[in-house]
Image (cartoon, coloured by chain):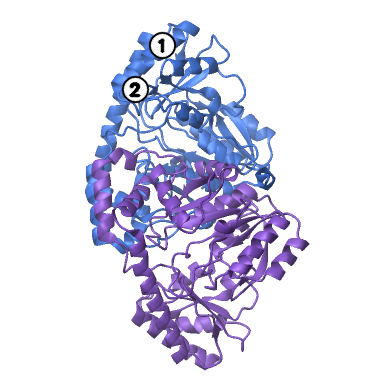
Chain colours: A purple, B blue
Amino acid sequence: MIEYSEFFSDRVKPMKGSAIREMFKRMADPEIISLAGGNPASELFPGDELSKIAGKILMTSPTLALQYGTTDGYPKMKDCAKARAEKVGAYSDGDSIIITTGANQGIDLTAKAMINKEDKIIVENPSFIGSLNAFRSYECELIGVEVESDGMNMDKLEEALKNNNGVKFIYTIPTFQNPTGTTMSLAKRKRMLELASQYNVLILEDNPYGDLRFSGEDVATLKSLDTEGRVIYAGSFSKILSPGMRLGYIIGNSTMLEKIEMLKQVNDVHTPMLTQLMCVEFMKKYNIDDYIEKNIKLYGEKCKAMVDAMEKYFPAGKVEWVTPEGGIFLWCKCPTIDDIAPIVDKCLEKKVAIVPGSNFALDIKAKNNQFRLNYSSAPIEKIVEGVRRLGEVLTENL
Amino acid sequence: MIEYSEFFSDRVKPMKGSAIREMFKRMADPEIISLAGGNPASELFPGDELSKIAGKILMTSPTLALQYGTTDGYPKMKDCAKARAEKVGAYSDGDSIIITTGANQGIDLTAKAMINKEDKIIVENPSFIGSLNAFRSYECELIGVEVESDGMNMDKLEEALKNNNGVKFIYTIPTFQNPTGTTMSLAKRKRMLELASQYNVLILEDNPYGDLRFSGEDVATLKSLDTEGRVIYAGSFSKILSPGMRLGYIIGNSTMLEKIEMLKQVNDVHTPMLTQLMCVEFMKKYNIDDYIEKNIKLYGEKCKAMVDAMEKYFPAGKVEWVTPEGGIFLWCKCPTIDDIAPIVDKCLEKKVAIVPGSNFALDIKAKNNQFRLNYSSAPIEKIVEGVRRLGEVLTENL
């Protein structure tokens, strides 16, 4: 018998399957209403349009679609990413762009290009588990900074920078953060850039949800406010076109991106050609902003339906939340209890799935009284029914 | 001014853009005949078939094609990979399968799951630069073992195993190796498995070309001969369907693959859904072996055309090669000189591109009198003309 664990690298020894994924396995029951995932609404996917586009590309340009492509991306796809980035000031003259197989790849490889064992990354706490686990896979130390309703606490960020040597970068989802749904204020963004400059660290700005604002005013991206070339920007087509196509991009200083490109070369060589070509054609033939507008309208309605149902069914005064102005997540806190875990299990018995906050915390083992709800995926009637079931469990247990 | 190199991880500091890619940039000249790349023949790509398939999938199953998928792959795509593997005995009961975004991703993440800094990997010398650079990105030590016309020298492999602690695995492309085109004999395969068992190391078998045999007899895969679960097998659809679709797979012990799946989860979350669904439909509607047969026939003809031209145009007795029985590469040695580099430059002046052997060597700076030719990509008349130009340069310089 081979003892495979002898062959494991140190980096994978502590890695465990995500608890969210374990929960998804328990969710195979079709009666369960899931408010747990992070899927965008599938009801608006432009299947007919993409069907015609894919058919035509493969008929007229089979070699382009099926042969090897270049690691940094198909040039016209890079132009599409640039166009999206320019709308939010996230492309500067001299920047490089790499098309990635989903934004997660860009985040993973950015960390790989910078992180030695025991280097440090400052992250929002809580934050997106996919990025946290990507960072952990390079054996770094993660330093969490509390997220408030207007983004990271800047005093605590400064403290973290002051008290830690070896911080390479700050990772932030400043707009409609996952999991909290909160948006960092303009003042805090400016302060973060000042601090990054003062302590000479870079910033990795992850902005998959920035286009999905249904109320309030846009806040400038960190990348657009950056005058020093300190921000690396990760963008995505997952929430504005299709997550299954796995199209993201990374923009930043060309010296850094050259290294990231080499890591992509040895990772997946290049992002599949057909999906890149389909995105280019979709953006050429249709106005993607019209399509995004439809999604925004739907997400605004779904979010309102969720919040209305929460106000109706949740036990009064026992659950706190900040109503989001965009994105796809809503974050709740139950200040009268220590640990939401037993309630999450009871929810599954009542056929509704939510994600306990511990999944997004740096210390996943600590007791946590928060949970994340998603409103983009389920249809409105399921959202209302799911919140009703959840409200029943909360009423009984809070 | 930010000094970006201060932020680089140690792993990327020594990484340089591949010399092959630099050469490809110089090859923008359309008059240059390239015998340098590794592209499969595009003239046989089933564009019409895949056009209909993609159009239908997106029309009838837009949610499946465009929504998030699972990290290990779409279940029917896993069945397709399993079916391909079973044809060469590369799937055993209890094995796991992960669909990867090209086989390179599987190779990269297998190394990531096993390699700590300063661990060792034994590789064929020369070998595929994409894998070597993926391994180097985990700061391991590569130990090269000479490749003979029937595969790795087994005495030298044993010596390498005996003299080195910390070897985690042996990486091999046993069939139609890149770059040498050679195939490891059955006896050597059995010996490699014995040695792996004796010294308790794993084997990563990379088999992208195994289906492309146009003469001689098939040799059993290492995976099929493995009775201990010591072999991890990387398969690919790049050379039998389309490289631009980026579809590969990895098969092996489930304890190891569970870790690799977690690394894929944080790398690209999952391989794009549409390309997976297209492969499934293609294999359902058509006999992929018929399609592969057409490729084999074409590659056999192209290889013969190349060898015939080499015999006609190369200076007699000055260039040595082993005529391949399959795959896409032909490896040449010029024993009367030390260094092929000046000749490669002269070839570019004469509008024919070849890859110097140094690109595939562990010591890329050492003088090298070998070069790699590819016969799958160019049409036959270009192959003949390319070899004629190459013969002119060789005749003048050898």
Chain bearing mark 1: B
* Residue A389 relative to residue B259: left or right: left
Compared with residue A117, is residue B289 higher up or lower down, i.e. above or below?
Answer: above
Name the one closer to the observer, A172 or A139: A172
Quarter occupied by the C terminus of chain A: bottom right
Q: Position of residue A198 (x, y in %)?
A: 72, 57
Marks 2 and 1 close (CB-CB < 8 Å):
no
* Residue B182 relative to residue B166: left or right: left
Name the one closer to the observer, A88 or B84: A88
Residue at image position (43%, 47%) is: A78
Name the one closer to the observer, A344 or A237: A237
Q: Circle 2 is placed at which residue position?
A: B303
Query: If you read the primary sequence from the N terminus, does the residue marked by circle 2 or circle 1 appear first?
Result: 2
Which secondary structure lies at badge 2?
A: helix
Q: Residues within 10 Å of mark 1 (few under 14, many from 20)?
A: many
Q: Position of residue A90 (x, y in %)?
A: 51, 55
Residue B34 seen in this snapshot: yes
Q: Circle 1 is placed at which residue position?
A: B391
Q: Position of residue B258 (x, y in %)?
A: 52, 57
Chain bearing mark 2: B
Residue at image position (55%, 64%) is: A173
Q: Nearer the viewer, mark 2 or mark 1?
A: 1
Type of amino acid at the residue the image marks with label 2 = Cys
Type of amino acid at the residue the image marks with label 1 = Gly
